[in-house]
Amino acid sequence: MPTTIAELALSAAYRQAQRALAAWLERGSAEMRRGAFAARAAIAGLDAAERHRLARWLAWLCVAARSRGESIIPLRIQRLDAALSMMVEDVLSRLPAGIGPSPGRDYHLSMPLPTGTAPYMTSVRSSR
C-alpha cells in the first residue's frame, strides 16, 4: 500500500553532528571543553543545507530552554561556533510571534560572557 507521508531523509553527517551537539550541550563545563572538538569536527562535515537544518534544531532547543528558565544554550552555541550561532539567531528572529524573541526578552547570542570565560573558537580550522 503506497504511503502519502514524506519520509525525512537525514544524512549520516547530519545525524553525527546532531548527536555530537546534543552530547556536548548536556555535558558539564569540564567535559564541555573536550567534547567541543568532536562537535566542531562534526559541524565541519555539514553542507550549507544541513548547517541550516542544524541551526533550526538548535533554535528550537533555545526556545525549549528559555521556557524552562535556562539561558546557557545560546551562550554555549556562540562559544562553539560563531557562524552557527549567527544562523541560530537568524532562525530565532524568524519564529512566529509569541515563540521567538520578544521585545522584553531577547535571544541575542552576542550577549557578553562572564569574566574569566575562555576565548571564542569560531571553527575547527581556527588556530590558537
Image (cartoon, rainbow, N blue to C red):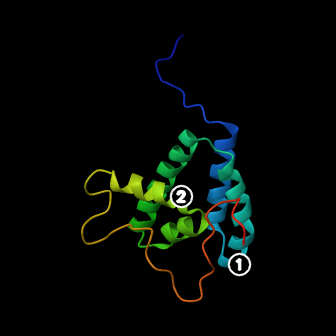
Q: Amino acid at mark 2?
A: Ala
Residue 20 badge = none
**Mark 1 surroundings within 10 Å by alpha-carbon count, few (fewer than 14), some (14 through 19), many (20 or more):** few
Residue extending furthest toward the bottom:
115
> Which of the two marks, 1 or 2, is nearer to us in this view?
2
**Mark 2 surroundings within 10 Å by alpha-carbon count, few (fewer than 14), some (14 through 19), many (20 or more):** some
Residue at left offset 69%, top offset 52%:
42
Q: In the rendered image of this protein, does residue 31 appear above or below residue 43?
A: below
Residue at left offset 65%, top offset 36%:
11
The image quarter containing residue 97 is bottom left
Residue extending furthest toward the front:
127
Q: In the rendered image of this protein, does residue 90 appear above or below residue 30?
A: above
The percent position of residue 60, horizontal first and vertical second, equals 45, 54
Q: Earlier in the sequence, mark 1 or mark 2?
A: 1
The image quarter containing residue 66 is bottom left
Q: In the rendered image of this protein, does residue 60 appear above or below residue 28?
A: above
Q: Which residue in the protein does label 1 denote?
A: 30
Residue at left offset 63%, top offset 68%:
121
What kind of element bears circle 1?
Answer: helix
The image quarter containing residue 15 is top right
The percent position of residue 39, horizontal first and vertical second, equals 68, 58
Q: Which residue in the protein does label 2 denote?
A: 83
Q: Amino acid at mark 1?
A: Ala
The percent position of residue 28, horizontal first and vertical second, equals 66, 75
Q: In the rendered image of this protein, does residue 64 appear above or below residue 115?
A: above
Q: CA distance from mark 1 to mark 2?
A: 24 Å
Residue at left offset 47%, top offset 23%:
5
Of 45 and 105, the residue lying toward us = 45
Which quarter of the figure is the C terminus placed in?
bottom right
Residue extending furthest toward the top:
1
The percent position of residue 61, horizontal first and vertical second, equals 48, 58
Which quarter of the figure is the N terminus placed in?
top right
